[in-house]
Image (cartoon, grey):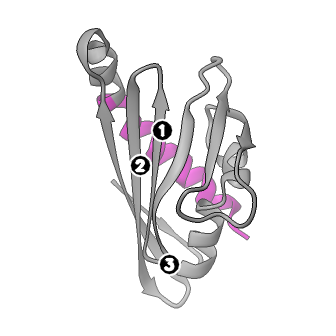
Amino acid sequence: MTVDVEAPVDRVFDYLCEPANRPAWQASLRRVEVLTSGPAGIGTRWYDVTWPGVRPLMEITAWEQNVRWVEHGVWRGLEVTLDLVFVPLDEHRTRVRATTDVLAPGWRRPLGWVLDRLGPLGARDDLRRAARLIP
């Protein structure tokens, strides 16, 4: 799934990859609780505190400045990965390509199936919201 953003790639990357910005654009979040200090990068960890009460532990697992960013979340045996690729269209516009992957073993499989189908729609809506908020 892709979303085009009316901002240069460096601003888009910096905004989307900062966990502290997430509650402003991710509909399910109340807040984030960052567990690591310093600037965001590989190994940065935080809890997503969601309105339904789910608190997945998140970690940045890939970071290529202005090119690619990957987060991995774990909650009660469910694992979800979000992979964002940033493609500059020109000096003022960026295409963000998002891929999600859900691992839900055993009795969690039905929930994984639902998340696999609905996750991309939620991610698309969240990225569209973020596109309107990027300074």
Q: Position of residue 75 (x, y in %)?
A: 49, 25
User: Bounds of the magenta span?
Assistant: 116-135
Residue 30, visible in the rendered structure:
yes
Residue at (71, 43) in percent of width and height: 23
Asked if the magenta segment contains residue 102, the reply would be no
Apparent side of residue 42 relative to residue 3 in the rendered image (left or right)? right
Q: Secondary structure at mark 3?
A: loop
Apparent side of residue 22 relative to residue 74 in the rendered image (left or right)? right
Q: Which numbered circle lies on residue 66?
A: 3
Apparent side of residue 114 relative to residue 7 in the rendered image (left or right)? left
Distance in Å between CA atoms under marks 2 and 3:
16 Å
Q: In front here: 9 or 36?
A: 36
Q: Which residue is mark 1?
A: 73
Local packing at callout 3 (Cα closer than 10 Å; few below 14, some 14-19, many 20+) is some
Q: Which residue is mark 2?
A: 82
Distance in Å between CA atoms under marks 3 and 1:
22 Å
Q: Position of residue 110 (x, y in %)?
A: 27, 14
